[in-house]
Image (cartoon, rainbow, N blue to C red):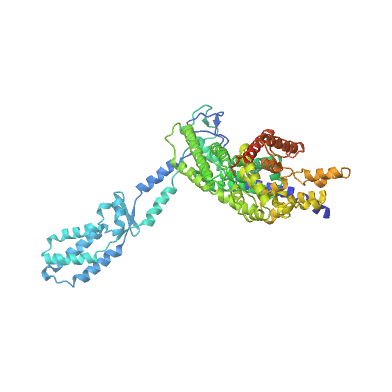
Amino acid sequence: MKKFLNRLLQNHSFIYKLILYTLTVFLIVFMLPKGGKFKYDYFKGKPWQYENYIAPFNFAIQKTKVEIDTEISEIKQNAKQYFLYDETVYNNSLDEFNLKFRNFDFNLEDQEAIKSKGVEIINEVYKNGFIDNQSEQILLDASQYITIKRGALAIEIDKDDIILSNQLLKMISTRLSDVSSPKNSSQLLNILSNVIKSNVTYNKDFTEKIIQNEIENISYTKGSVSENELIILKGDIVEGKKLEALNSIKNELESQVWSKSNYNWIVFGYSILVALAILMLFLFLRKYRPEIHDDNNKTTLIFLNVLLMVFLVTVVVKYDTRYVYAVPLCILPIVLKAFFDARLGLFTHVLTVLLLGFVVPNSFEFIFLQIIAGIVTILTVSELYKRVNLFISIGQITLIYMIAYVAFTIIQEGNALNLKFFYFGLFAFNGLLAFLSTIFILVYEKIFGLVSDVSLLELSNTNTPLLRLLAEKAPGTFQHSIQVANLAEAAANEIGANSMLVRTGALYHDIGKLENPMYFIENQSTNVNPHDELSNVDSAKIIINHVLDGIEIAKKYKLPDRLIDFIRTHHGTSLVYYFYMKEKSINEDNLNIEEFKYPGPNPFSKETAILMICDAAEAASKSIKNLTAQVIDELIDKIVSKQMESGQFINAEINFKDIETVKKVIKKKLKNIYHLRIEYPE
């Protein structure tokens, strides 16, 4: 059991990666659609490039969304409007009329005739009904014939037979024109105006129910294709009924409910393809980015972002496939380039887009657009600490999306008349969402302890607590660090390295000298040298320890690992040459070279290699009193040759051309620093 546990502990990193790999594959396969997949790509108006296509089974030709929407619109436009007729209002109006009629003073000989006239008018008003004010506009907008529900009966009548509120007084006045006297007419008009109430109202619920029933009964198909029937010949143009048939069978296959056996085979197929894609990413990390592969923290960040992008696209596709281009996939290469490098960012982005080809419709168009956008992202996004750079890059990415979309539309439609500005809006929205990459970078920095150019800009401020402390306790080292930072930044710009990273690393590379600042010559302000009282071995040990002390101080102040790498590697495995030669001159027989060697490791990137060269060059230039252009050239050549001979750059991603460029930059800078000035008169 103990042996088994020891083996687990020894292989814990491999076990973690195996779990991460399995979990990533499982989650991606889980999110992918499990229906069928149409295996042919085709475009409207273009020739069918495959063999003659025969219907594999019976299927119905489906109507397009435009056709269905048109039918729904026609149903709503031509739908009958239903109104309710309230019988009780008529009876209540008669009762109220009889009651009020008694309270008015009519001549006895005219009373019965006037009452009959009133009842006659009430009967005429309620014959077809008097509509309320709220329902009038609906009646006016309705078709000529409407349906009124009177109890269990539904009667269709002309809408002009319904009395409106603005017609009521006019109708009553017309009917009262033959009443015996103006007084009687006025009194009867007053009574009728008070007792007649609207009894027809719009039946909204019933009308909408009828419309909904008609919409639900719409047929979504228009004809059918029989099994083994020819759908399209090779070379035929994809249009008309052929296009409709192809679209229908494609939808049929992709929405097909599979049997358990078929479902398992589909999941198995997806699992193989996804597993291969994720395996390629692991192999890429292992071969070309071993430092990332060996760091579980960084590996987790990469796979988390891949899963996040697949999840977002899957959710959007399930909601509405039209919005798939609103998902800002370019966030993935932006984030990975900010923390790692452009090559890894592009490789991961391409693999993610290929996986998403299983999810989205028109996969070729989607993959092409997203890969082009990813390439533009990698080529344009740089120096994220400059906000305008991100703004310009995202603007270029959005423009590329739009140009590519226009090109695809022209290819598919044969002209540019059918461009949908909805997609231009989606691309613009995509660009706005891409600015969230800065928030993602900030969150990942806090969670995973990584560093981006934005953080580097903050750390390179000489007012940070650690650099202020260095300036106070070791002012000579502080000035040396600034000079090295300037040299390293200029050299990095020339060979395309990360100038902000190397500058910040240079500012912190010697913070270990804070432990014993006076044992380093640049901080000695007097002629007293504490090394005079120590043996060469002890002196070398103090010098070497500034690397180890620097690592401890950096961890105490929570500097990111990318900066600690500069502290570890800025001397590589070189010798403390001065004390080594002193010891060799007096004790060559018992000399142990390992006591004078820095612990390493050697530089493993362009940036750390640049720092090693600049650090040695700047320090050596201070040791020569009369510097001339020739002396500087010879000094730099000698330093770099010695570093190369001792194998300091064997693990660094830097070539001879880059090294020569760095040497030229350093020579030029040092000549500018140490150039002679004219002598001022006394």
x, y percent for residue 449: 65, 52
Please report the residue visible at 34 percent of the width from the left and 52 percent of the height from the top: 81
x, y percent for residue 448: 65, 52
Q: 136 or 544, which lies in front? A: 544
Q: 356 or 56, which lies in front? A: 356
Q: 639 or 109, which lies in front? A: 639
Residue 220 in view of the camera:
no
Residue 322 in view of the camera:
yes
Horizontal relation, residue 225 to residue 583: left or right: left
Q: 249 or 622, which lies in front? A: 622
x, y percent for residue 492: 63, 40
Above/below status of 88 relative to 136: below
Q: Residue furthest front?
A: 682
Counting every numbered tag in the picture gives 0
Quarter of the figure that contains the N terminus? bottom right
Q: Residue furthest top?
A: 235
x, y percent for residue 16: 72, 50
**Image quadrant where residue 169 sits:** bottom left
Q: Residue furthest right?
A: 589
**Image quadrant where residue 575 sits:** top right
Quarter of the figure that contains the C terminus? top right
Horizontal relation, residue 610 to residue 65: left or right: right
Horizontal relation, residue 66 to residue 549: left or right: left
